[in-house]
Amino acid sequence: MNKKIENFAKEQLGNEVAAGIDHFKRDFVIAKKLAKLENINYDEEILHAACFLHDLFDESNEEHNIVAERIAGKFLPSINFQNKKIKIVKEAIREHLPNGKPKSKEAILLHDADLIDFLGATGIVRLSIGAWDWMEKSSLKEFVGVFEKFRKDCYKNLVLDKSKKLAGEKIKFMDLAIKELKQELVE
């Protein structure tokens, strides 16, 4: 079932870089690491599906978490994913944003893993692409503003204590990068 989900995600995303299949893999690895550090028992099928379907999108103007939730809700029954598990996957997808309010173990793990993946060197790269592609920013000064906002919002919205610890080193790198970028800005 995992391969079917991953193949579906690849088909849906094409060559998406900032929120594509590599991001999904990192989120899954980070989420499992957090579960181990926090001693959280979770359902691996639910966590996998949530991690690999949470950033799917279409051409509508709806928030991507709502679109991804809808796409997952249509796709998962087609591969005989259990209905009771689909409900938890959909909640995890809906609540993965920084301001989300995840309730289930799998939703909390995805939420924190996804926020951690916006920090550090990976975060700078993802946000550079996202600032231009998703947010239509066009100057380095605007990019720095995006980095600062995500650095603050992602860290403050982490749910698990171990998430904050994991994010610590990434925050140090990000702070240095932001400081350096500000010094290099030309007005």
Image (spheres, rainbow, N blue to C red):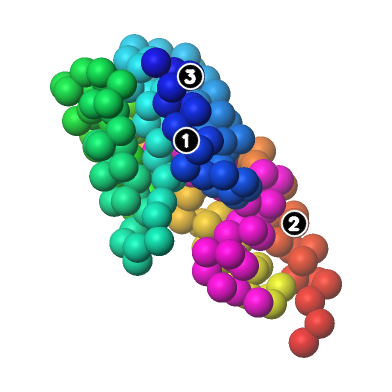
Q: Are marks 1 and 3 in contact (CB under 8 Å)?
A: no
Amino acid type of disc 3? Answer: Lys
Q: Quadrant of the N terminus?
A: top left
State how far apart marks 3 and 2 are (Cα): 37 Å
Q: Quadrant of the C terminus?
A: bottom right
User: Residue 81, percent across and down?
Assistant: 26, 20
Please tell me which residue is depicted at 74% across the width and 63% down the height of the picture: 179
Amino acid type of disc 1? Answer: Ala
- Principal secondary structure, stretch drawn in magenta: helix
Please tell me which residue is depicted at 52% across the width and 57% down the height of the picture: 150
Depicted 81 relative to depicted 154: above or below: above
Q: Which residue is mark 3?
A: 3
Secondary structure of the residue carrying numbered label 2: helix
Q: Determine crowd level at label 2: few under 14, some 14-19, many 20+ residues with C-alpha closer than 10 A.
A: some
Q: Quadrant of residue 144?
A: bottom right
Res 185 visible: yes
- Name the side, left or right, on which 63 lies relative to 38: left
User: Residue 135, percent across and down?
Assistant: 52, 69
Earlier along the polypeptide chain: callout 1 or callout 3?
3
- Name the side, left or right, on which 178 lies relative to 44: right
Please tell me which residue is depicted at 16% across the width and 22% down the height of the picture: 84
Q: Which residues are magenta?
A: 111-138
State how far apart marks 1 and 2 are (Cα): 32 Å
Q: Which residue is mark 2?
A: 177
State how far apart marks 1 and 3 are (Cα): 10 Å
Secondary structure of the residue carrying numbered label 1: helix
